[in-house]
Amino acid sequence: MNSIEFDIAGFKKFEESLQKVKDDKDSLMSLKQDCLKPLAALYIRTAKLNTPVGPRSVKYKMGNEVKTKRFNPERTRQSWAAGPLVVNNREAIIEVYNTSRYASFLNDGHRQKIGQFLPWIGAEVDGVKQGARLVKGWVDGQYMTEKAEDMVNRNARRVLNTAIRKWLEERGLMND
C-alpha cells in the first residue's frame, strides 16, 4: 500500500490568519466600506451622466417686454449624494439620493396641462422665445435611477472581487 505524507502547517497558518480577521471587527468594517463605497460612487456617476441638463435661462417675450426665465435653480445633476455607511447585523447600506425636489418627476415622468401657454417655449426670434402652448399631456421620465441601478448590477461582481482581493492581499491571506 502507498502512503501519502501531507504537511498541514500551511493550513494551520491559514486558520490562524482567518481567526485574526474574524476577531478584528475594524478590519471587517473596512472590508464592507471598501466594497460599498465604489458601488455608491458608480451609482452616483451613472445617475449624474443620465440626468439631463437643459438651458439655465431663456429670454422670452411677454407683451412688448423681454424677460428672463431661470430654470432648475436646484441643479438636479449636482444634487446626487451618498449618505453614511450604516451597518447592522446582516447588512451594510449606503443610501444614494437626490435632494432636488424635481428629481422624482424628472426620473419617473409627469403630467402637464394641455393647452397651457408658456412664454419661455416655442419659436425663437432674435434670441427671444415667442411662447407656445403645451400639446402633450405626459412627459416621459429619464429613468436615471433605473439606469444607475442597472449599471451597478452589471459591474458589482467585478468591483466586489477587486475590493475583496485587495483586502485579502493586505492581510496576507492571498498569494498569487
Image (spheres, rainbow, N blue to C red):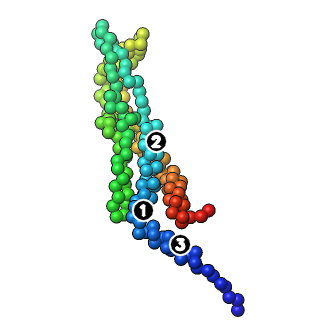
The CA distance from mark 1 to mark 2 is 28 Å
Q: Position of residue 157 (x, y in %)?
A: 51, 56
Front label number (1 vs 2): 1
Q: What type is the residue that disc 3 sits on?
A: Phe
Q: Which residue is mark 1?
A: 28
Q: Residue furthest right?
A: 1
Q: Position of residue 50 (x, y in %)?
A: 45, 37
The one nearer the camera, 152 or 120, is 152
Q: Position of residue 123 (x, y in %)?
A: 41, 16
Query: CB under 8 Å between callouts 3 and 2?
Result: no
Quadrant in the rendering for residue 27: bottom left
Label 1 residue SS: helix
- Compared with 29, 108 (above or below) is above
Front label number (3 vs 2): 3
Q: Residue furthest top?
A: 64
Q: What type is the residue that disc 1 sits on?
A: Leu
- Compared with 17, 99 (above or below) is above
| Upstream in sequence: badge 3 or badge 2 | 3
Q: What type is the residue that disc 2 sits on?
A: Thr
Q: Residues within 10 Å of mark 1 (few under 14, many from 20)?
A: some
Residue at (38, 57) in percent of width and height: 92
The CA distance from mark 3 to mark 2 is 40 Å
Residue at (32, 39) in percent of width and height: 99
Task: For the N terminus, give its image quadrant.
Answer: bottom right
Q: Which residue is mark 2?
A: 46
Query: CB under 8 Å between callouts 1 and 3?
Result: no
The CA distance from mark 1 to mark 3 is 17 Å
Label ID, residue 14: 3
Q: Residues within 10 Å of mark 3 (few under 14, many from 20)?
A: some
Residue at (65, 84) in percent of width and height: 5
